[in-house]
Amino acid sequence: MPERISLRQLDYFVTAAEAGTLTGAAQRLHVSPSAVSAGIGELEHQIGVQLLLRARAKGLTLTATGRLFLPQAKALLTSSEHLRASVQEVGRNPTGHLVVGCFTTLTPFLIPWLLEEFPSAHPAVTLGFVEGSVTRLQQLLREGRCEMALLYETDVEDGIAFEKLYSVEPHVLLPQRHPLADREEVRLADLAGHDMIMLNVPPSRRYFSDLLARAGISPRVRHSTESFEVVRSLVARGAGYSLLVQRPALDVSYEGRAVRVRRIADEVGPLDVGLARLAGAHPTQRAAAFASFCRARVPQYARTPDHDFPFRCGSCAGNGAPGTQALPS
């Protein structure tokens, strides 16, 4: 029967890879350099590949296999730590610091509310957040730098578990004096030949480009930006149209210039927003409490018809006239 890889071996390997030398790893682990070297050697022998190159003058260098193995080793160590914490927390109220990831365009709509409301339900948990693209957030989950993440289901990778909370629908954003601005809804094909302002946060660019491609359009991108508000400001200035999913409470840019939000006439389907976590990882009690809170409260929050929640679920949006708060559905 093959010997099992131990957490000690993984810890020695990860620490050595991060420290760059056996001596540096030994100091962090409070063991001898020979113990670190032996542990890594045992690991390499068991899996049958070399993970680190050892050079007296240059220290430690990851092999190609080592670079692939490192994030997986980190994920296993994080999972074991979560398991230990969850067992220790049995029978106790959730406590400690919880870091949650959030997709960058969702952050201003969800995180401020969660930072205010979640501590009311679980006062012993301090909630922090990181934001980024879907790709970046999944990397943070794998590295253990956040326990859960709020994101769209688009481009969810293997090894990441996703749980839907609610759905939203994309819309067209137009300048006030755009030729299509007076229409109540816009066919994607009608956007052909018009300049576009592209939100370029993965996977937004590919998602919107695919929507247009299905309508037979190759978008004429005049400007591309990672900033949601820069997109809205450029549209308000008349630089072009855009496609977005989230909608602020007021249809004006930072400068106070109005924009027009129009329903897409085509059948485009909703986008699911939900919670992501590392598949197979045992959540801490505080992470489990956050997930339960989101299941119970976020879908209801998404359907609130007043100004407390300015973006709308596609299945429950109101049929507001141009300039009203509800996103036409």
Image: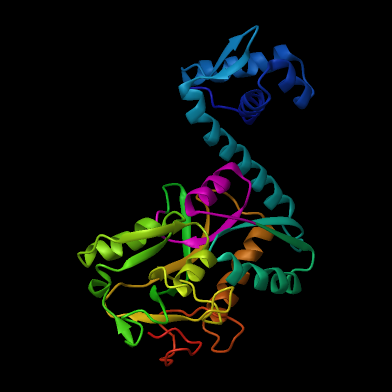
Residue 272 lies in the magenta stretch: no
105 or 219: nearer the viewer: 219
What is the basis of the colouring in this image? rainbow
252 or 143: nearer the viewer: 252
Is the residue 10 above or below the residue 253 in the image?
Answer: above
- Residue 172 occupies quadrant: bottom left
Residue positioned 43% across, 92% down in the render: 320
Q: Is residue 30 left or right of residue 244?
A: right
16 or 183: nearer the viewer: 183
Position of residue 113 measured from the top left corner of the image (x, y, whole percent)? 66, 73
- Residue 19 occupies quadrant: top right
Q: Residue furthest left?
A: 216
Residue 140 lies in the magenta stretch: yes
| Residue 132 shows in this picture | yes
Is the residue 91 above or below the residue 13 in the image?
Answer: below
Position of residue 323 measured from the top left corner of the image (x, y, whole percent)? 47, 89
| Residue 1 shows in this picture | no
Q: Residue furthest top?
A: 56
Residue positioned 61% across, 18% down in the render: 40
- Residue 41 occupies quadrant: top right
On-image quarter of the C terminus: bottom left
Position of residue 186 measured from the top left corner of the image (x, y, whole percent)? 30, 80
Q: Is residue 291 left or right of residue 152?
A: right
Q: Which residues are magenta?
A: 130-155
Residue positioned 50% across, 16% down in the render: 50
Position of residue 291 measured from the top left corner of the image (x, y, whole percent)? 59, 65
Is the residue 258 above or below the residue 210 in the image?
Answer: below
237 or 117: nearer the viewer: 237
